[in-house]
Image (cartoon, rainbow, N blue to C red):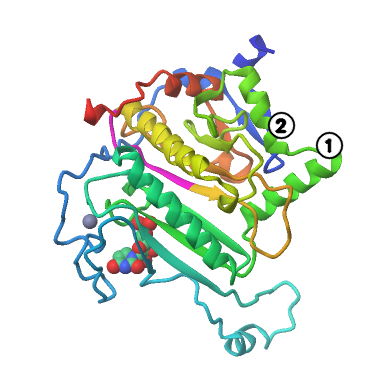
Amino acid sequence: MAGSMEFPHRRYNPLRREWVLVSPQRTARPWQGEVSGASGFSTVHYDPECYLCPGNRRAGGLVTPAYESVYIFDNDYPALLPQADSAQMQSRSGGTSEPLLVAEPERGRCRVLCFHPDHSLTLARMDLASIRRVVGAWTEEYQLLGEEFRYVQIFENRGAMMGASNPHPHGQIWATEHVPDEPAAETAALQGYRRARGSCLLCDYAQCEQREGVRLVCENEGFLAVVPWWAVWPFETLVLAKRHLRSLLDLGEAERDGLADILKQVTTRYDNLFQTSFPYTMGFHQAPSDGDPHEEWHFHAHFYPPLLRSATVRKYMVGFEMLGMPQRDITAESAAERLKGMPPKHFMDR
Ligand code: H2U
Ligand code: ZN
């Protein structure tokens, strides 16, 4: 198989039950596309103009208190509202009997979580104790929001290239009445695998990656980070719990420390790769909070970074990818090798 990996091939993603096209022979092609500006680090610890810095007035008019560790608030511009007005919804869609024009109300809650009061920091540059407090806050939010909503999506958009509105270290949490499509597709795949094999897809996959070793980026006692076999984004990673944990609520104290550590390891290697504040969308996938036990679920994080070959050259998902299927050039193995080869210490701290 090793030799054939240099030619175009398809790889299967059992978690999404879809394929990715891999074209390793294309990496030498010339590039004259867009060169975006490098995403550098902010150098100020407090920005009087920042909506998320302690003590400042937010865009919505409320004042962010002088917080000292993490700070959580309801999004001033939420995409979802706790009380959907179903009566109004009826009048908008109920007037038509068209079977193809389907709509239904969606309730939810959107929260913003400031990771740290220091405007200049990122997960990669925060100390472990501070990241550990963020893990604690994520866990509490998952528990609390999960009591009212069926799914809790925790995520971070890092960097302007990924649409983050502000460099201040922060993430978002959206809780929804329905399980969104991505975790719903993973739930179906995890359930299907468990029914067919009697084991957990991601427990088996973690063991497979530890045996093979070639896609392993870093690990600690509780977690491992790999460029998955089916990665779509050039330096995509999957952070997997080694134990069968269904959600953040199943993590023990040591595993919460371990999660903080693996997030720091991954983001540090990312920053070191192109000596930049590496942009990405990161988020956790975990058991829906819909009342079912979800024994099939295996807690993990996806990192989807857009950069391809420097701090300024990104991958675009266009053309065949939009109309056909996802495609990548560099193999998952070569991406993993490069990330694994990065110094574990952040280049700004050296
Ligand atoms: P990003 O994670 O993409 O940067 O988005 C930050 C969120 O913070 C965004 O959803 C919210 C925006 O609505 N926000 C506030 O709620 N209040 C503010 O004062 C600024 C930003
Ligand atoms: Zn700030």
Q: Position of residue 313 (x, y in %)?
A: 35, 33
Task: Judge left or right: residue 315 versus residue 68.
Answer: right
* 192 versus 181 height, above or below: above
Residue 272 or residue 197, whichever sits in front: 197
Q: Secondary structure at mark 1?
A: helix
Q: Which residue is mark 1?
A: 197
Identify residue type, mark 1.
Answer: Arg
Mark 1 crowd level (few <14, some 14–19, many ≥20, 10 Å Cα): few
Q: Which residue is mark 2?
A: 204
Viewport quadrant of the C terminus = top left
Instruction: Tell me which residue sits at (55%, 45%) in the image.
Output: 252
The chief SS type of the magenta part is loop
Identify residue type, mark 2.
Answer: Asp
Residue 213 or residue 146, whichever sits in front: 146
Residue 147: quarter of image: bottom right
Determine contact: label 2, label 1, CB under 8 Å: yes
Q: Secondary structure at mark 2?
A: helix
Mark 2 crowd level (few <14, some 14–19, many ≥20, 10 Å Cα): few
Instruction: Tell me which residue sits at (16%, 54%) in the image.
Output: 46
Q: Position of residue 44 (x, y in %)?
A: 15, 48
Q: Position of residue 334 (x, y in %)?
A: 50, 19
* 12 versus 245 height, above or below: above
Q: Position of residue 20 (x, y in %)?
A: 63, 34
- The residue segment tinted magenta is 275-282
Is residue 316 visible to the viewer in this orientation of the structure? no
Task: Judge left or right: residue 55 versus residue 214.
Answer: left
Q: Quadrant of ligand 2?
A: bottom left
**Is-magenta flag for residue 279?**
yes
Instruction: Tell me which residue sits at (47%, 20%) in the image.
Output: 27
Viewport quadrant of the N terminus = top right
